[in-house]
Structure formats: C-alpha cells, structure tokens
Amino acid sequence: MSRMNGSLSLEGLVKRFGGTQVVHGVSFDVADGEFVVFVGPSGCGKSTLLRMICGLETVSEGEVRIGGERVNDLPAARRGLALVFQSYALYPHMTVYQNMAFGLENLGMPKAEIAQRVGEAARMLRLDEYLQRKPTALSGGQRQRVAIGRAIVREPRIFLFDEPLSNLDAELRVGMRTELADLHRRLGTTMIYVTHDQVEAMTMADKIVVLRAGRVEQVGPPLELYNHPCNRFVAGFIGSPQMNFLEGRVAAGDGPGLAVEIPGFGVLRTNAAAHGLAPGGAVSIGIRPEHVRAGHEGDNDLTGAVAGVEQLGGLSYVRLADPNITIQIPGQTRLAAGEATPVHFPIDALHVFDADGMTVPAIS
C-alpha cells in the first residue's frame, strides 16, 4: 500500500468546554510510522486529545500538524485519518464485506479497487471466510477486526484507536494486542492508541505519552518511563504491580548518596543526590515489587510483617502490612501470613521523590 507522510506535531494544544479548560498546552511530536500510546487515568484528556487530532473536536488554542501541514481548520474527512472506536460501530444489516466497503463506495471508488482493498485487508486480518456473514454471527474479537479492516481499506496516514479492546474479555485482549502490534509492523503506518491500561501501553508502544488532568507528564519509550520516571505519578502509573512507596525524612549521613529515615523502621541509603534537600525534609522512596528481595543481605534491610501471600506457581506476591509494600518473588515461597521477615532494598533500584513528587536525580 502506498501512503502519505503520517507524522504528527501538537504545539501548545488547549481545549476548553465553555469556561472549563480540560487540555492544557499539550506539545509533542509523533514520527512517521511510530506506534504511540496515550495513557492515563479516566478523565485525563486522552480521548479529547484524539478527537482534536482527527477533527471531531475544535482546537481552542495551539496547532495540529499532520505531515507538516496545519490541519486545525481542515474537516475530519479530509485529514486522511481513520478512527477505530471502543464500540465496533458496525452496520448490523450489512455483511462483513459491505461494512468494510461502505466508506469506499461513498467516495465513488471503482468496484474493482474496492474488492482489491477489502480482499487484502481481509487476508491480513484472517477474515476471508467471514466476508458474507453479518456482525451478529461474529465473536467480539472478529467484530473488532472488521472495524480495524474498515479503517485499513481507507489507507489512512494515521490510525487512531480509542480504547478499542475495552469491550473484550481478558484473553481476547491479550490476543488482539499481539495482532495490532503485528499489523503495525506489516503496514508501517503511524498508529495512535488511547488506553487507561498501562500494560497495553508497555507491550505495544514505541513511545508512551503519560497524561494527567489534561497535561503531559512524560513522553518516551516504555522502558525509559519504567526505569527513569520523571515524577511519582509516572512511577506509580507505569508498571504492574504498582511501584511501592515509603514515606520518609532526609537523614544525616556521611555517604555520597541521600540517606532517608523511614520512621519506625530505620534508614535506607540511596543513590540520589543530596543537594537542595535539608535534613528532616519530607521525601518518599519508590521501589518496584520485583526489585525488593526477601531476606537479610546486610545494608538497606528492613523487617516487615507478612499480611498475605498470593502463590501463582511461577511467581508469588507477598504483601507486608508494616511497612505497606508488595514483594514479587520468582517461583514459590514458604512465607506465610503473620510471619516477620527481613526485606532488602537494593540501592540501585531505589527512586527518591521530593515533597512535590518530582524525581530526585541520582549522583552524576
């Protein structure tokens, strides 16, 4: 398939509904061919941003550029985009073929070209044998593939997906994530995908845009956000299970890194730079469940009380009541509720956040 430049640039994008501002000066770039995921909690502005890109919402301030062209005043139908909704939005009285061909017929495209495009998309999505069926005779996953196929036949510059998998059960969602990632590799077309599910974001994206309350918190590749979150919100939102947080105070220490006292438990040494943080100042330490180690290893140990254990066979989750953290242990464990256990906090795995929730940089 031939295609046009699918790069996207948002510059100072603002959206107001009456006197309420819901998007606050959003700016970032999407390269041609990238798979970018907008992620954040409900109400953070993900879908509003998507609708401004495709022209279903007007832009209050700022610019939307597609392939270098300003499109603020361009109608949605002329932007060269294809939107796949959360609801499949299929016509129930039409066959799969008719659903996929309908938009092209409205454009007056020759029947032979329509048949070629629908046939290629159907083969790509493994829908060949279902072309004469009605949507009611399909499973949820098959209906979603038809909705995606209807977008593919338009050969858009950018695909826009608005939580397309949220109506599917857990097993189907996993399968469709893989199919969408494979589809992106085959087509090479820019894809922008909206979800509140950070697992979808981590597994599918070339680049993630983390949003909160209409503002961009951080933009970057999945592992960059996972390993180097810029603030506590991103650290807590990216990663499953969620990062553990321990509240503490800056402690006096003679080492190069910041020492943090966890009241009632002891002092943890970190690699964070101590400059600008006064002794006694409030900070928090973050560590991911898979990085905490059960057992005594010397420095950076605390003792906690086991509140519960979830044995999943290949790994186990141990919840401590005091301090309130979760430990992910490979394989199985003999720890049981009610036991006290030492836990080790590797210094290289600790993230430190100041009183404003911003990441305290490591010693350079």
Image (cartoon, helix red, strand yellow):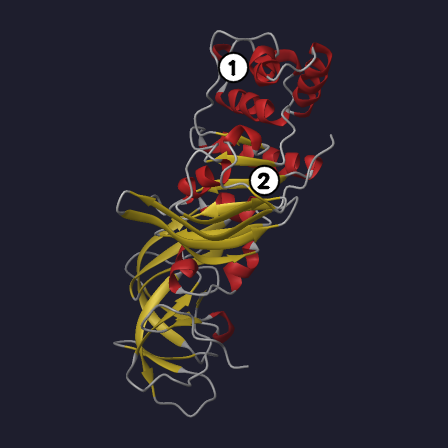
Q: In this orientation, which residue lies closer to the viewer: 173 or 61?
A: 61
Q: Can you say whether 51 is above or below 213 in the image?
A: above
Query: Quick one: label 2 or label 1, which is nearer the N terminus?
Result: 1
Image quadrant holding the N terminus, namely: top right
Q: Would you say residue 223 is visible in this rendering?
A: yes
Disc 1 element: loop
| Residue 102: mark | none
Please state the horizontal and vertical placement of residue 81, each as a whole percent of the image: 57, 33
Q: What residue is disc 2 on?
A: 191
Q: Residue furthest front?
A: 73
Q: What residue is disc 1 on?
A: 138
Question: Left or right of 192: which side holds 286?
Answer: left
Whole-angstrom CA distance, mark 2 to mark 1, is 25 Å
Q: Would you say residue 240 is visible in this rendering?
A: no
Q: In this orientation, which residue lies closer to the viewer: 73 or 65?
A: 73
Which residue shows up at 35% across the image and 65% down it? 245
Q: Can you say whether 247 is above or below 179 in the image?
A: below
Please state the horizontal and vertical placement of residue 266, each as a whole percent of the image: 32, 79
Please state the horizontal and vertical placement of residue 327, each as a whole percent of the image: 41, 60
Question: Left or right of 207: which side holds 249?
Answer: left
Please state the horizontal and vertical placement of residue 151, each as a whole percent of the image: 58, 26
The amino acid marked with disc number 1 is Leu
Q: In this orientation, which residue lies closer to the viewer: 36 or 259?
A: 36
Check whether the beta carbons of the residues at disc 2 and disc 1 lie within 8 A of each other. Answer: no
Crowding at label 2, few (<14), some or many (≥20) Cα neighbours within 10 Å? many
Q: Can you say whether 26 is above or below 276 in the image?
A: above
The amino acid marked with disc number 2 is Met
Disc 2 element: strand
Crowding at label 1, few (<14), some or many (≥20) Cα neighbours within 10 Å? some
Q: Residue furthest bottom?
A: 254
Q: In this orientation, which residue lies closer to the viewer: 353 or 45?
A: 45
Mark count: 2
